[in-house]
Image (cartoon, rainbow, N blue to C red):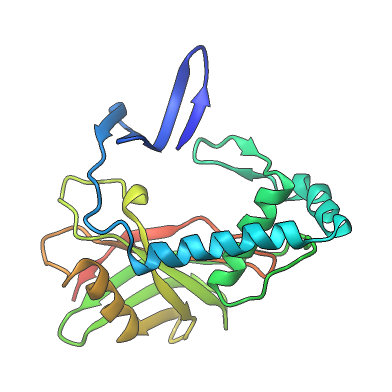
Amino acid sequence: MLVKWGSIIVKGSGKLGGHVFSSGQSGASVHTSARARNPQTLFQQNVRSRFTKLTQAWRDLTEVQRESWYDAESSFSRANRFGDVVTLSGKNLFESLNINRQIIGLAVLNTAPLPSEIPKNRVDVVEIDQSLGTISIKGEFASSQKYVIVGTKGLSQGVRESQDELRRLGITNSEFDGGQIRFIDTQYSRYVGRFGLPIVGRKIFIGTYSISTSGQRSPNSVVQAVFV
């Protein structure tokens, strides 16, 4: 849950208790959150396990190693969804950067890194070909870089914002054919396994984000997929 405090509260985004806070062109809104049928999915268990291990790893650091993370706090300031600049604590920074590194298969850093360049990430077109069982993403990407693929279930045509519906589908290496990343078979199967077969007539948003060697990540670049 992300809240921006004013005289009382001026903005809110995320979940709190059984409610979801969001905002759009018509203003702020609150609606009741539906409980997932299976809150103990394998994906959720993996996330919790990773977080638990990093919490323990933080306790096992030496004092010098922890101090390096405290000293790095201001170097990794970031903007939240409201555009406000926030600074993570040393412990939260350790967990945030290392979770991102683990997502793309990199080892845990015990000492804080220096900020590094975040690989370019811009999605222009996403095409779903059900006859071939492929999903192709075209845009501007870095060569030989691992990208995190995100997507949504089929949404109604009236939906314009997809950020709250995005779920991580998997990781793919950039494979270039005229500036195109193409991920097939495994990622299409993972989409079907998570959301079911894509349905023509429903809005499906798919995109990517990139992670640097230091664990910093780019914003999501997402577009509505088209059926071909």
Most extreme residue toward the right, as rendered?
64
In the image, what residue occupies the spot 30% across and 86% down? 185
In the image, what residue occupies the spot 39% across and 74% down? 138
Residue 135, visible in the rendered structure: no
Q: Is residue 22 left or right of residue 153?
A: right
Decide: is 125 above or below 93. Answer: below
Residue 18 x, y percent position in the rendering: 30, 36
In the image, what residue occupies the spot 55% across and 41% down? 80
Residue 128 x, y percent position in the rendering: 23, 75
Q: How many marks?
A: 0
Q: What is the quadrant of residue 11 in the picture?
A: top left
Decide: is 220 above or below 124. Answer: above
In the image, what residue occupies the spot 48% across and 14% down? 8
Q: Quadrant of the C terminus?
A: bottom left
Most foreground residue, 5 or 180: 5
Decide: is 18 above or below 55. Answer: above
Residue 131, visible in the rendered structure: yes
Q: What is the quadrant of residue 214 in the picture?
A: bottom right
Q: Is residue 228 left or right of residue 221?
A: left
Residue 30 x, y percent position in the rendering: 29, 29
Residue 150 x, y percent position in the rendering: 38, 64
Q: Quadrant of the N terminus?
A: top left
Decide: is 124 above or below 162. Answer: below
Q: What is the quadrant of residue 181 in the picture?
A: bottom left
